[in-house]
């Protein structure tokens, strides 16, 4: 018996700087999780993943990550994905530094 499909976003890492990025509904890549396209159909999710995988000069390791609808857009449902939205944990820089300002 297969599991019921749960909403997803397409995520990957930027090829040049390694930052976590998300695919938007208008085919852009963004660093903001809440701007990602929330995909609620399994077939559409597979098409969006194929679209992302077809951009090897832009992204590395695209995959579907579980998400849920939130007040300001998609929100991660798993600790790993929530952690990825905050950037590296070994020292404050980038997203973490901006949060401390």
Image (cartoon, rainbow, N blue to C red):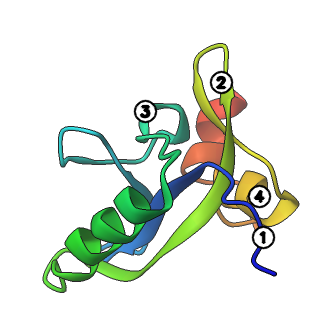
State which mark lies toward you, 3 or 4. Answer: 3
Task: Kindly identify which numbered label has been placed on residue 101.
Answer: 2
Task: Kindly identify which numbered label has been placed on residue 100.
Answer: none
Q: Position of residue 55 (x, y in %)?
A: 16, 78
* Pointer 1 or 3: first along the chain: 1
On screen, residue 7 versus residue 56, left or right, reads right
Q: Which residue is mark 1?
A: 3
Q: CA distance from mark 2 to mark 4?
A: 19 Å
Q: CA distance from mark 2 to mark 1?
A: 43 Å
Q: Position of residue 86 (x, y in %)?
A: 68, 50
Q: CA distance from mark 4 to mark 1?
A: 25 Å
Q: CA distance from mark 1 to mark 3?
A: 27 Å
* Pointer 4 or 1: first along the chain: 1
Q: Position of residue 10 (x, y in %)?
A: 45, 61
Q: Are marks 4 and 1 in contact (CB under 8 Å)?
A: no
Q: Which residue is mark 3?
A: 35
Label 3 sits on a secondary structure element that is helix
Q: Are marks 3 and 4 in contact (CB under 8 Å)?
A: no
Label 1 sits on a secondary structure element that is loop
Q: CA distance from mark 2 to mark 3?
A: 22 Å
State which mark lies toward you, 2 or 3. Answer: 3
Q: Quadrant of residue 75?
A: top right
């Amino acid at each position: 018996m297969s599991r019921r499909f749960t909403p997803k976003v397409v995520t990957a890492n930027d090829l040049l700087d390694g930052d976590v990025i998300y695919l938007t509904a208008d085919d852009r890549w963004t660093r903001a999780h809440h701007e990602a396209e929330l995909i609620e159909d399994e077939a559409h999710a597979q098409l969006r993943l194929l679209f992302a995988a077809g951009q090897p000069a832009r992204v590395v390791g695209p995959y579907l990550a579980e998400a849920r609808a939130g007040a300001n857009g998609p929100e991660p449902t798993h600790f790993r994905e929530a952690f990825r939205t905050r950037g590296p944990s070994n020292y404050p820089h980038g997203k973490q530094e901006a949060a401390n300002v």
